[in-house]
Image (cartoon, rainbow, N blue to C red):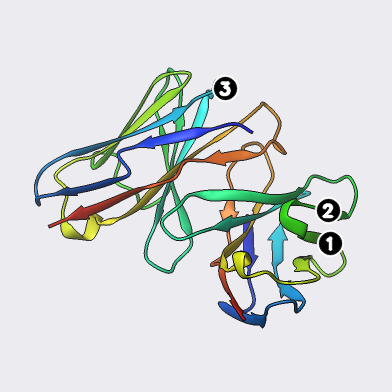
Amino acid sequence: AQSVTQLGSHVSVSEGALVLLRCNYSSSVPPYLFWYVQYPNQGLQLLLKYTSAATLVKGINGFEAEFKKSETSFHLTKPSAHMSDAAEYFCAVSGGSNYKLTFGKGTLLTVNP
Amino acid sequence: GAVVSQHPSRVICKSGTSVKIECRSLDFQATTMFWYRQFPKQSLMLMATSNEGSKATYEQGVEKDKFLINHASLTLSTLTVTSAHPEDSSFYICSAPLGGDLSDTQYFGPGTRLTVL
């Protein structure tokens, strides 16, 4: 069984500030971890993924995430927020014998000018 | 990157009618596709796994007779909401993994907004 917990349904930052979106997971098998971004009324776009290689994963748009097994975490960060980063962010986990993704509830990121 | 399309993007229908939503992988073959449902301000909930050439696998609590899935080819899966009711109004999203490895990226369609009056 797998689950994802995203702490904070809404995060608000100022433009230029650090972005930190938290994700903790539970998995009975070695996990694959993903961060997706969703803009209003659109599908999901992959930001980055962890697949048991490097624990620090760099993605698109300046985002990165670090896999910490001891903490069962995969937090998403970006050093400097941009207005265009405002969106809903979903953390997801998969593993086992199929591709099924289990999503967290999402975190809405707002960026203030 | 790989592209997944959905059609229609929006549909409004009367209660009791059936609605078909198409999901296409445009530049790759997908033996497996997934259908999700997303309620406003909520996460994606997996409804079913669509398998080319065989029956779909439904998640617990999803009525297979209400949500008919047909994966007729390696690039097309369809979801038909039969006898739709207002509570079926939702955002439906499909996805398809690019390759045969668990770590392969799932590419998502842009979603279909269904409104049942």
Q: Residue at x 87, y 67 (%)?
A: A70
Q: Is A12 left or right of A16, judged from the image as shown? A: left
Q: Position of residue B24 (x, y in %)?
A: 43, 28
Same-subunit check for callouts 1 and 3: no
Query: Looking at the picture, which amino acid does disc 2 mark?
Result: Val
- Which residue does the numbered mark 3 point to in the structure image? B28
Q: Residue at x 55, y 20 (%)?
A: B29
Q: Residue furthest right?
A: A54
Q: Are marks 3 and 2 in contact (CB under 8 Å)?
A: no
Tell me which chain the residue with mark 2 is part of: A
Same-subunit check for callouts 3 and 2: no
Q: Secondary structure at mark 1?
A: strand
- The quarter of the picture where the C terminus of chain B appears is bottom left
Tell me which chain the residue with mark 3 is part of: B
Tell me which chain the residue with mark 1 is part of: A
Q: Position of residue B87 (x, y in %)?
A: 22, 60
Q: Is A89 left or right of A40, judged from the image as shown? A: right
- The quarter of the picture where the N terminus of chain B appears is top right
Query: Looking at the picture, which amino acid does disc 1 mark?
Result: Glu
Mark 2: give few (<14), some (14-19) or many (20+) Cα within 10 Å.
Answer: some
Mark linked to residue A66: 1
Q: Secondary structure at mark 3?
A: loop
Q: Are marks 2 and 1 in contact (CB under 8 Å)?
A: yes
- Which residue does the numbered mark 2 point to in the structure image? A57
Residue A28 visible in image: no
Mark 3: give few (<14), some (14-19) or many (20+) Cα within 10 Å.
Answer: some
Label 1 vs label 3: CA separation?
Answer: 30 Å
Same-subunit check for callouts 2 and 1: yes
